[in-house]
Image (cartoon, helix red, strand yellow):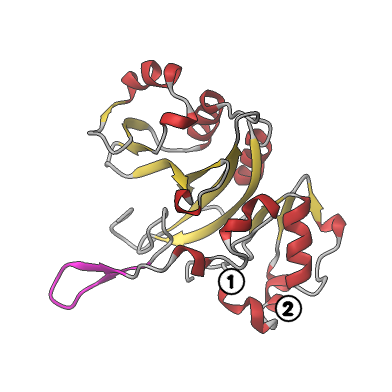
Amino acid sequence: MFFKSKIKYNVTKAYFLVTETNSLNLDSLFDIFLQYSDSEVVQFSLNYEEAKEIKCFSQKKVALCVEQLESLDFYDVKSRAILTVNKVFTYLNFKFSVLEFTVVNSFCEDFKKEVQLFKNISSAGDLVYGYSRVLRSDYLPITENKVQKKLFGGISVTVEIEEAKWLVHPEGIEQGAIKGLYPLNYLNDQAFSILQEYSGGFFDSQDRAGNILLIDQQSQKKLSDISSLEKFMHFSQIN
C-alpha cells in the first residue's frame, strides 16, 4: 500500500506508441518524470530484477531501449513506487509497442504541475493518451484497484479485467481509445473526437488547450447524468 493512512495523492498515466520508425526518447522522459516527482528516488528495479541503488541507473539507461524494457520501477526511501514504466497490451499483438508511464505525486487539486508535465513530455515521443486523477492510499496507483482490509488482518485486492476499465477498448488506442473522463485528460484529435461522440458533443474544441482538457465540477455533474458514462467517471478517490 502506498501510505498507511488514507490521505490523497495525484496519479498520472501517460501512454506512448513506439514503432520501428517512431522512436521514444527514454532518457529525456525519465528525467522529466523524476523531476516532476516531489519524492527523492533512491532505488530502481528493471524488468523485475532486484532493486538497486539509483546511482547505478545512469549506466543502465544509456543502453536501455524499448525492445529491452518490460517493466521499470523507481522507489523512494520508504520503498514506495513513485514512477513505473510498463510495456502494456502485449497480448493484443499490436504492430507497435505501448509504454505506460505511471507517476505518483502529492495531492494538489488544481493539477497545475500535471498540466506542465504533459506539456514537457509531449515532445519526447508519440504521446497518444493520458490523464491525471486523485486517489486515496487505499487504492493501488498502478492498477487503480482498491485495497481492502480483512476482518482478521491481511488485505484483499479487487482485480478487474483491464478492458473493462476502458470506455473504448484499448485495442483502438492508435485510433484514439480512452479510459473515461478525469479531472485532467490528455487527448489527441482522434481521442477528443471519440469523447465528443460518447458525451453527445458536450465539449467545444476551445475547451481543449494543447491536447489538455480539464473538466470542472460543474461539468462533472452534468456529465454524470449521461448513463453510458457513469462507470467511466473518475473524479474523486472512488472509482
Q: Is residue 193 left or right of residue 40?
A: right
Q: Is residue 6 left or right of residue 190?
A: left
**Picture quadrant of residue 197:** bottom right
Query: Which stretch did the figure color magenta?
Result: 146-157
| Quarter of the picture holding the N terminus | bottom left
Residue 33 percent across, percent down from the top left = 52, 35
In this rendering, the label closer to the viewer, 1 or 2: 1
Considering only vertical position in the picture, is 239 above or below 86?
below
The residue indicated by pointer 2 is 222
At x 35% / y 64%, what residue is drawn? 138
Q: Is residue 88 left or right of residue 56?
A: right
Residue 151 inside the magenta-drawn segment: yes
Residue 173 percent across, percent down from the top left = 62, 53
Residue 139 inside the magenta-drawn segment: no
At x 72% / y 56%, what residue is drawn? 191
At x 79% / y 54%, what residue is drawn? 208
Q: Is residue 63 left or right of residue 22?
A: left
Q: Nearer the viewer, residue 98 or 150?
A: 98
Say the numbered circle drawn on residue 232. 1
At x 64% / y 76%, what residue is drawn? 229
Looking at the rendered structure, the secondary structure element under dot 1 is helix
> For the residue marked with disc 2, what is the amino acid?
Lys
